[in-house]
Amino acid sequence: MPLDILQVGDPILRQVAKKIPQDEITSPKIKDLIAVMKETMRAAPGVGLAAPQIGVSLQLAVIEDCEERMAGMSPEIRRERGREPVQFHVIINPKLTVTNEGPAHFFEACLSVTGCSRITPRALSVRVECLDENGNEKIITATGWYARILQHEIDHLHGKLYIDLADKRTEIVNDVINRQKWLNATSMEIDNFLKKACLE
């Protein structure tokens, strides 16, 4: 059964999560945690969920960006944003290294900050060293939207939220009209929106 997702203001979201000892990763407790996080993320729905968001201060996150989440997005915009399907996977005790600072600007939202989005700068590409759900070492190299997801989720494990980086002047309410308006927005349109907000 999906769990409730903690909202901004809860102190757990501002804690640095604890690393999981490698010999505990395959324990029933962690396996159950992964299963409930997967269910909660899909029910939300979202493309990622970190353990602190359900009240568990451990360095673990689940990620999945399926085709259904991209419905209505044009092929051109998908290419521009570097958005490709990402199969479900788990990252544990991740260490992130930026390999191309960019930055890339786009609206970002969070399951723990419901009801709004803000333009948030993120690195264009990253390298993540982590463990998988079997305790095996894994290296992920990611660009585009996948890199944005990784940065967002790993921030959660260090007590950070996207609103710490986002430009609060660019906040929009997540309603149907705004979602449709920005779903296929080009980088130029986003840059113009950002410049206009900075002038106001």
Image (tube, helix red, strand yellow):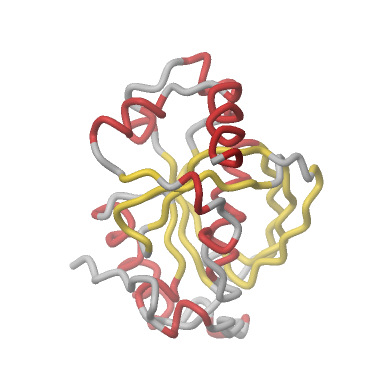
Q: In this view, does 64 lie to the left or right of 138?
A: left
Relative to 97, does residue 181 appear above or below in the rendering?
Answer: above
- 18 above or below 40? below
Left or right of 127? Residue 122 is: left
Question: As rendered, which of 102 and 3 lies closer to the eye?
Answer: 102
Q: In this view, does 192 lie above or below 162?
A: above
Q: Quadrant of the N terminus?
A: bottom left
Residue 77, image x, y percentages: 51, 20
Q: Which of 13 and 139 is in front in this view?
A: 13
**Residue at image coords 57%, 47%:** 120
Left or right side of 104 for 75: left
Q: Residue at x 44, y 83 (%)?
A: 12
The quadrant in which the C terminus is found is top right
Residue 41 lies, in percent from the top left, at 33, 57
Q: Looking at this view, name the residue that lies furthest to the left.
A: 1
Q: Where is residue 181 in the image (x, y as percent from the top left)?
A: 36, 25
Where is residue 69 drawn, in percent x and y?
Answer: 35, 35
Work out whether 32 lies above or below 2. below
Point 30% across, 44% down: residue: 174
